[in-house]
Amino acid sequence: MGNRDNNTISDACYSYNPHTNSWSSIASFPGSARYAAESFVIGSKAYIACGNGGGLNLYKNDLWCYDSGNNEWIQLANFPGGNRDNVSAFSIGDFGYVGGGNNGAYNTRGDFWQYNPASNTWTAIKNMPEGRTVTTQFVLDSKAYIGLGY
């Protein structure tokens, strides 16, 4: 999923096997094709949030889960922070976190939300000190770190 060399947006998805150093095609993404989406993993499921379908008015706020056991995508509760791309996303324990990002012409956001897959619900959490988009994020010892970006 994302931009191809010819600047078209693809819905194709692949799985990487580090043991064989090979890629395999998986179920195509059923939502509208996009780029600048972000992901997080909880247990054996991968989640994709938000993104851009190719223009200022095509920002997304949907959340999708990939279940590798069934090779299927499931649409979940929409991200409540509104349409945006280049969000920050990560997981800690049994929860996913999504926030920041851009909701048009680099109008950056600082709000953050916690996703609970057990109840398929979102809860607002403390905002970042300033809005950021196109960030780098990682989790270490159950603490998330977000840096760089605009």
Image (cartoon, grey):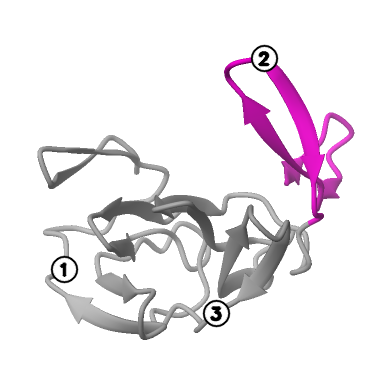
Q: How far apart in space, not on screen, are marks 1 and 2 (Cα)?
A: 42 Å
Stretch in magenta = 1-28
| 14 magenta-colored | yes
Name the residue that disc number 3 marks. Answer: 76
Q: Secondary structure at mark 2?
A: loop
Name the residue that disc number 2 marks. Answer: 20
Q: Secondary structure at mark 1?
A: loop
| 59 magenta-colored | no
Q: Earlier in the sequence, mark 2 or mark 3?
A: 2
Q: Earlier in the sequence, mark 1 or mark 2?
A: 2
Query: Residue visible at 32% across and 65% down?
Result: 109
Q: How far apart in space, not on screen, are marks 2 and 3 (Cα)?
A: 32 Å
Q: Position of residue 123 (x, y in %)?
A: 25, 82
Query: Residue visible at 45% across and 77% down?
Result: 79
Residue kind at label 3, given as amino acid type: Leu
Task: Report the residue that reaches farthest toward the front.
Answer: 69
Q: Secondary structure at mark 3?
A: loop
Q: Which mark is residue 127?
A: 1
Residue kind at label 1, given as amino acid type: Asn
Image quarter (top left, top right, bottom left or bottom right) of the C terminus: top left
Left or right: where 18 falls relative to 12: left
CB contact under 8 Å: marks 1 and 3: no
